[in-house]
């Protein structure tokens, strides 16, 4: 027991001597503060990732040629583009296919949505003898940030769900 007390006393003297050095005190405090600071920044960054979706740049490319339904010319691609660009929860920007592709590659856009030329025709083919499935093509910037790629996938799923409800409803 006596050896243990003397060992604690020596440790306490060692700590007091270390703490009396200004350089050592700053080093120890720095080693304690830096991980805490990093933890707080990390938590702040990932606290609510969907809070800033309206700042995430998303590109939309409408190549739809439109189609005729009930004797009227319509363009579902233009309607979808107008709906998405007017939504204040997201930041959709109309662009060309080349600029969208380049933007995804150089981190200008987190996602590029491509509406094909036959989009309206495919959507209206549901009531015909040869129905076709409508295809939207996405390019997602996977390399910039894993979390933003996950959020962008959720946005793409939301667009598909809205479109499905619109076409079936």
Image (cartoon, rainbow, N blue to C red):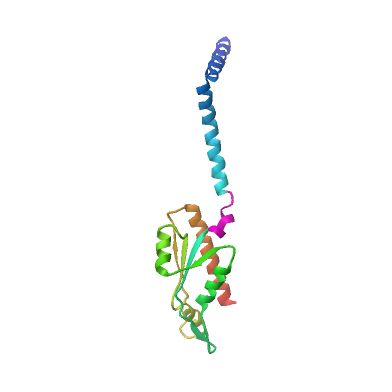
Where is residue 52? Give x, y as percent: 57, 56
43 left or right of 131 in image: right
Vertical side of 107 occupied by 78: above or below: below
Magenta span: 47-55
Any magenta on residue 54? yes
Query: Quick one: quadrant of the C terminus?
Result: bottom right
Vertical side of 97 occupied by 10: above or below: above
Query: Quick one: quadrant of the N terminus?
Result: top right
Residue 35 or residue 130, whichever sits in front: 35
Vertical side of 66 occupied by 6: above or below: above
Vertical side of 9 occupied by 132: above or below: below
Any magenta on residue 32? no
Tell me the residue at 51%/23% (across/down).
24
Residue occupying the far top of the picture: 2
Residue 139 or residue 62, whichever sits in front: 62
Instruction: Report which quarter residue 162 is drawn in.
Output: bottom right
Kindly report the secondary structure that dominates the magenta region of the rendered protein. helix
């Amino acid at each position: 027991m006596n050896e243990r007390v003397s060992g604690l006393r020596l440790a306490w003297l060692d700590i007091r001597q270390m703490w009396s050095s200004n350089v050592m005190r700053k080093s120890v405090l720095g080693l304690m503060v830096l991980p805490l600071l990093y933890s707080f920044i990390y938590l702040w960054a990932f606290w609510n990732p969907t809070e800033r979706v309206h700042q995430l740049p998303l590109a939309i490319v409408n190549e739809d040629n439109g189609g005729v339904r009930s004797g009227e010319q319509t363009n579902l691609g233009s309607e979808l583009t107008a709906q998405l660009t007017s939504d204040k929860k997201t930041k959709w920007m109309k662009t060309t296919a080349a600029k969208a592709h380049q933007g995804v590659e150089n981190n200008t856009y987190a996602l590029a949505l491509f509406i094909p030329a036959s989009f309206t025709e495919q959507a209206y083919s549901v009531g015909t003898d040869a129905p076709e499935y409508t295809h939207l093509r996405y390019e997602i910037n996977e390399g910039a940030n894993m979390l933003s790629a996950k959020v962008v996938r959720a946005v793409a799923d939301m667009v598909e769900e809205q479109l499905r409800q619109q076409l079936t409803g």
